[in-house]
Image: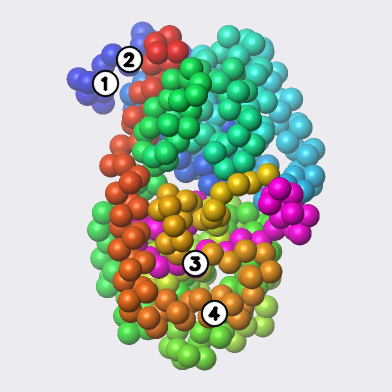
Amino acid sequence: MLTHSDKSYAIGPGDFKSVVIIAGEASADLHGANLVTAMKRLNPEVIFSGIGGKRMEQAGVEILFTASDMAVMGLTEVLSKLHVIYQASKAIKSLLKNERPDLLILMDYPDFNIHIARTAKRQGIPVLYYIGPQIWAWRGGRIKKIARRVDRMAVILPFEKDYYRQTSLTVDYVGHPLLDECPRAMDKNRIAHKMGIGRSHPVVGLLPGSRKEEIRNLLPAMAGASEMLAKRYPDLRCILPLAPDIEASFVQGFLGDSNQEIQLFQGNIYEVLSICDLVLVTSGTATLETGIMGVPMVIIYKISPFSYWLGKMIIHVPHIGIVNLIGGEEVVPELIQDEVTADRLAMEALAILEDTEVRENMIRKLRLLKEKLGKGGVSDRTARIALEMMRGENV
């Protein structure tokens, strides 16, 4: 039911509005679904189609291409996905030209989305970029294309709004959407009991990523590190929450002949994080989820040698982990490329588990990081911006 403050977003019976929304990465599927839900609550007459995953489909989006089929890790790995990316680009551009939706919403996935934005702009379709590309980290020259092709930005990191001041773009800092997902309080004892874990057990979470390339590259080192940790802590428990589009059978293939049991979990990742003493996590969205929950972590990242070499040439940031970038220092340790070994990972993990001062300092800095991210209500805030644009306001 619409509240008094929402009435201005209603439209007449039968006056349907259409939106194309593109979340080309699996990690954006959740935020896309929440945005769609918020927009439908404000205006039930809006219909959606585009690129996304299971959550967006459940929220009512007609999925034309699946995000997990288009997601890539590294600069050279895109080659294996070129065919499906090309087909998706062709289909979306045709949709924009022939159906002329009332709004195009883009979410991250910059190379594809900035290209699609040009078609929308030529057709006079308003373009909202929600969760903008990290041009402050690499290929900053794209800011000129974005300014030409995008009508409005809804950015999610506190320093991003200032970055766009050099353009004429209307930019709103809406806060980080993960704040709406992170529960304020959880019954850790109940969750541990449900998973058969005693609180005397050290609990380590393994988060190898939502892409198959990430799991293939990083899970073996995580599994090896867990074996080493179990030698120090015989009652160690390891939990691996499965990403929505990843099957358990795929993950099992990379656990090898590990003597350390790793419990696979399908469900709310925050339940897992709430009972973890430490998390070994692939650089990406999961690092921020872990940070918001205040859980100590070690971040790892590994791609093909050639992609890494190219990346070093064009990416200019002091850290790879978003928690460290927001914190402005190495809040949590990072292991990159050849540093990603079971030995090194276990060593960093033990330093956190066994040094109370290191651990408590890390938790304190993660709490400060959460405060920098805003106060929630991000999907509703962005939904109002989107609906304003569909009515021709503030564009």
Does the residue at mark 1 contact the one at mark 4 (Cβ under 8 Å)? no
Which residue position is annotated with label 1? 6
Q: Which mark is residue 333?
A: 3
What residue is shown at x 67% (from left), y 32% (from top)? 112
Q: CA distance from mark 1 to mark 4?
A: 52 Å
Mark earlier in primary sequence (1, 3):
1
Q: Nearer the viewer, mark 1 or mark 4?
A: 4
Q: Which residue is tagged 4?
A: 346
Name which residue type carries label 3. Pro
CA gap between label 1 and label 2 equals: 8 Å
Give SS at disc 1: helix
Tell me if label 3 and label 2 are in contact, CB under 8 Å.
no
Q: Which residue is mark 2?
A: 10
Marks 4 and 2: which is nearer the front? 4
Q: Could you give the CA–CA distance between mark 1 and mark 3, rounded to whole angstroms?
A: 45 Å
User: Who comes first in sequence, dot 4 or dot 3?
Assistant: 3
Q: Classify mark 4: residues with Cα within 10 Å, few (<14), some (14-19) or many (20+).
A: many
Answer with mark 1 or mark 4, whichever residue precedes in sequence.
1
